[in-house]
Amino acid sequence: MNSFELNTFLHEHTFFEKFLLNCKNNNIQVIKSFIQNTSFDQNIMRKFPLMDEKNSEDFLINPKKQFETKTIYHPRDGIIFTCHPRFGEALEHHHDYIEMVYVYSGECHQKINDANIAMKKGELCILDTNVVHSIEPASENDIIVNCLMSKKHLDDILIDRLSGNDLLSTFFIHALYERNNFNEYILFNSSESEKLAKLMEDVLCEYFDRSLCSDEVINSYMIIIFSELLRVFESHTNSQSRDLLKNASITDIVLYIQNNCKNATLTSVAEHFHFHPNYLSTAIKKFTSHNFTFVLQEAKLKKASFLLKNSDIPVVEVASNVGYENTNFFYKIFKNYYGCNPTEYRKKFLTE
């Protein structure tokens, strides 16, 4: 599949979209007549796997039924790409998987946690496992691609490879381990990234036209896509912070905290970058949405995670190496962040 074939495929109407376009009166006879007179193209319906030929009548009689519990489950592990159905509203709901919403063409208007979010071509949004959202009816040229990622896929494929990337690794770790306490989203201003658009085009071609080693290729594309998203996010954030932070960027500051987490304090970091501590504290809160204490603690825990996975240093020494002399306190905050204590965390990786 090439880019032209992908574009044609994504714009083709699915069976469900034909129904939404042509059947305004959804009584049983109209639905039965539509099913009898409309071919069900299995190839095109790969874009919308919630519906198949066997359940089409039940689905069309009550298409809103899937939203009644407000939780949409997907039966498979791994990663799946779908196209959001045009011409119909997606009522308020949430998922038990990570969802990535990408605007291939046109626009996407959705409400996330009661906030109205307008996305244009090339922009991308990542929603965690509990975020509540709804999507307004899309028009003919509004091609909205959803990437559904199971927790197993995140844990097996992405977490380790993104462990050095503060933004996404934190987001995914919360989604995996915080259960019902985390319902965030990240919106990327990626409309001008030609590289991201090409990467998304390539991964969609691979997904909808599978061949030898497609799963491995798709996984590799996703790592590159997330890396590009981080660059987009960093570029946007640093352009905003340049005036506020003078010659430093927020990335420089966070990296300094990560590299010096054992002994770093707000005062020492402020002195290094020649800021007043209160000024630096405000800047960190503005651009990371977290206070200095949280950023420092997170840096310590990530370094501890690395040491636990890649060395046989005793846990008490790991705690000391990252700046915690009170081992009991270290155990407590480590479990709050990762969902298990340091000993259990190390055993998990030793047995894999």
Image: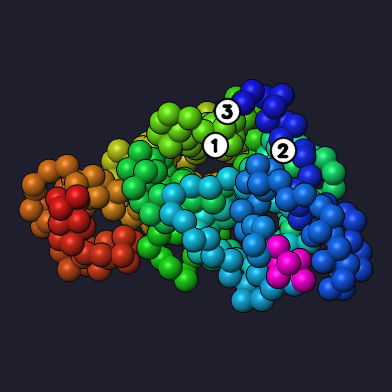
Residue 207's tag is 1
Quadrant of the rendered structure where residue 176 is? Answer: bottom left
In this image, 134 relative to 328: left or right?
Answer: right
Question: Magenta stretch: dominant SS?
Answer: helix
Q: How many marks?
A: 3
Q: Residue at x 57, y 32 (%)?
A: 209
Which amino acid type is marked by label 2? Leu
Q: Nearer the viewer, residue 193 or 220?
A: 220
Q: Residue 167: x and y, percent?
A: 47, 45
Task: Answer left or right for 273 relative to 80.
Answer: left
- Give the x, y percent position of residue 261: 29, 46
Real-space Cα distance between discs 2 and 1?
12 Å
Pointers 1 and 3 in contact (CB under 8 A)? no
Instruction: Give the mark, 1 or 3, whose residue is nearer the N terminus.
Output: 3
Name the residue located 79 percent from the left edge and 59 percent from the top edge: 35
User: Is 266 situated above or below 179?
Assistant: above
Q: Which residues are magenta?
A: 56-61
**SS class of the residue under badge 2?**
helix
Per the rendering, the mark at residue 189 is none
**Residue receiving disc 2:** 10
Q: Secondary structure at mark 3?
A: helix
Name the residue carrying label 3: 202
**Which residue occupies 64% across, 62% down?**
54
Compute the Cα span from label 1 to label 3: 9 Å
Amino acid residing under circle 3: Asp
Q: Along the polypeptide, which appears first: circle 2 or circle 1? A: 2
Q: Provide residue 346's location: percent of width, then percent of height.
A: 17, 54
Query: How far is the residue under mark 2 from the one under mark 3?
Result: 13 Å
Closer to us: 191 or 301: 191
Does the stretch in magenta take in 242?
Answer: no
The amino acid beneath tag 1 is Tyr
Which callout, 1 or 3, points to the residue nearer the camera? 1
